[in-house]
Image: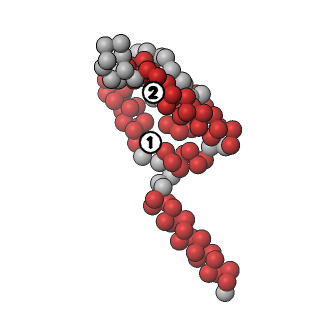
Amino acid sequence: MTALLLERDRKRLSAIIAIVRPKHSLEARLDALNETDRAQYDRYVERMSAFIADNDIDPDGDPGNAYAMTLRGYGPQLTRAIAAALFGETPKVLLIDTDDTAARRYMEFCDEQR
């Protein structure tokens, strides 16, 4: 009887976790990382926080400089493997793709992220 109760409770707990943390959520993807990748991600978060603290205000006193710098390729970067594990592969749009094909590829990418 105890084993059945534990199995039932385990199933309920799994169902609750699935509601609170859907399998495509960032938190669930972080939990799926191995120890090494998770340590690298945590280090990235620390480095990015320091980068933002050091660079967010531009020389004119305006905020948002750190974001602009990351768009230009400055600042800490996640490894490609960890970024793909967390956010999925970046959609590839070919130069020969029509607008409709490019839109379809992007929508497929968005659907995969849900």
Residue 82 appears anywhere in the view: no
- Residue 36 is drawn in which quadrant? top right
Q: Quadrant of the N terminus?
A: bottom right
In the image, residue 9 above or below residue 63: below
Q: Which residue is mark 2?
A: 53
Q: Is residue 14 left or right of residue 93?
A: right
Foreground tag (2 vs 1): 2
Under tag 2, what secondary structure?
helix
- Closer to us: 65 or 25: 65
Type of amino acid under label 2: Ala
Residue 43 appears anywhere in the view: yes
Q: How many residues crowd mark 2 within 10 Å: few (<14), some (14–19), many (20+)?
A: few
- Closer to us: 79 or 108: 79
In the image, residue 22 above or below residue 11: above
Q: Residue at x 67, y 83 (%)?
A: 2
- Residue 28: x %, y % from top left: 53, 50
- Residue 10: x %, y % from top left: 60, 71
Under tag 1, what secondary structure?
loop
- Closer to us: 112 or 100: 112
Q: Which mark is residue 51?
A: none
Q: How many residues crowd mark 1 within 10 Å: few (<14), some (14–19), many (20+)?
A: some
In the image, residue 97 above or below residue 20: above
- Residue 61 is drawn in which quadrant? top left
Q: Residue at x 38, y 32 (%)?
A: 106
Q: Residue at x 51, y 61 (%)?
A: 17
Type of amino acid under label 1: Gln
- Residue 20: x %, y % from top left: 45, 59
Q: Residue at x 68, y 43 (%)?
A: 35
- Closer to us: 35 or 96: 35
Q: Which residue is mark 1?
A: 113
Q: Tell me how far mark 2 sits from mark 1, CA to CA.
A: 30 Å
Mark 2 or mark 1: whose residue is earlier in sequence: 2
